[in-house]
Amino acid sequence: MHDDDLARKYGGFISFQTDADPISIEKYGESEDQDFERLLNVHIQPTSKVVDLGCGAGQFTCEVVGHAGQLWGIDQEQDVITAATERANTKGLSQAHFLCGDKNDPHILAEIPNDIDVIYSRRGPNLDEALAKKLKVGSVFLQLQVAEFDGYPLREIMGRREYSPYHFHNDHDLMVHYAYLHMQPISIKSYFFDVYFRNVDHLEKFLIEIPANLTDWRMAMLPYDPHRDRAALELYARYQTTKDGVRLQRHRRVMAFRKITLQYPTQNQ
């Protein structure tokens, strides 16, 4: 499948440009992408063994793999993995290996060595126990995450508010989860920025293309429905329309974790 076909099928979900993309993006100072790429450059060495968690069609992976010794990209869609493999072969990147399946699939895990230096997830899934075990002590996990409050207050206006005002937010949940995996946070930064759409129809197209923009993972999936949600979307646009277009605030978090060994005292110590 060619890139044009993948863009029509998956769009921005795997980082392809489409006509649903914002017409402009306003960031303030250093961006989350610059920070994430800086961390990759710091931690990936020419001999590093690297895993790209949620590699998509390999556009970003092929940029990274040139700095590494070997890299394994994981994604769940076969046509996407086929495209990533073809992209790497065209560029002569023999050190890139692409695997199709779930990150917990034993067949996938068997392909990945037990001395990984860097795992990264660029707007992909979180790290879990099986892959964390593949990291050497002292190795790192880097994550560029779509964070809570992304798109606020659009979710609230459209009836997708958090299920409780007292629930634990994603950052707390994630820190607890990674602590159990012996992953120590060494850097966490939040980035807020504004994106603009031509009009309410353009914003609606964006919400239809990537349903996850309205989703809280704790709740059932509730994608945008024009019959149910259009009136609420128009109310949002009434108050968020500026000279630059309809404004939507986004939130990204860039996090770095180091694999550590926890040693607790015994009764004799």
Image (cartoon, rainbow, N blue to C red):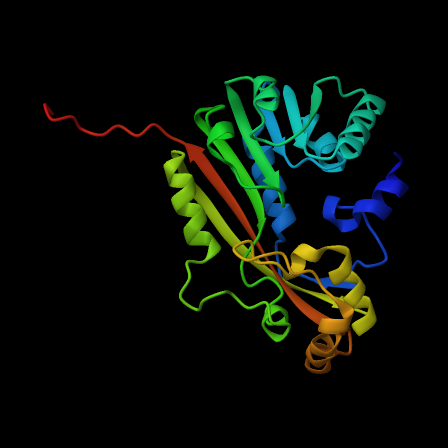
Which quadrant of the rendered structure holds the N terminus?
Answer: top right
Q: Position of residue 3 (x, y in %)?
A: 87, 39
Count of marks placed on residues: 0
Residue shown at 65% from the left, 24% from the top? 71
Residue shown at 79% from the left, 46% from the top? 10
Residue shown at 54% from the left, 29% from the top? 118
- As drawn, is 165 to the left or to the right of 144? left
Q: Position of residue 245 (x, y in %)?
A: 78, 73
Which quadrant of the rendered structure holds the C terminus?
Answer: top left
- As drawn, is 68 to the left or to the right of 268? right
- Asked if one can make out residue 68 in the rendered structure from this viewpoint, the answer is no
As rendered, which of 189 and 216 lies closer to the eye?
Answer: 216
Question: Does residue 126 sit above or below 73 in this rendering?
Answer: below
Question: Does residue 224 sit above or below 264 in this rendering?
Answer: below
- Asked if one can make out residue 251 in the rendered structure from this viewpoint, the answer is yes
As rendered, which of 135 and 82 lies closer to the eye?
Answer: 82
As rendered, which of 212 and 239 lies closer to the eye?
Answer: 212
Q: Position of residue 80 (x, y in %)?
A: 77, 34
Residue shown at 71% from the left, 71% from the top? 247
Q: Position of residue 224 (x, y in %)?
A: 72, 64
Asked which quadrant contains residue 225, the reply is bottom right
**Identity of the residue furthest to the left in this view:** 268
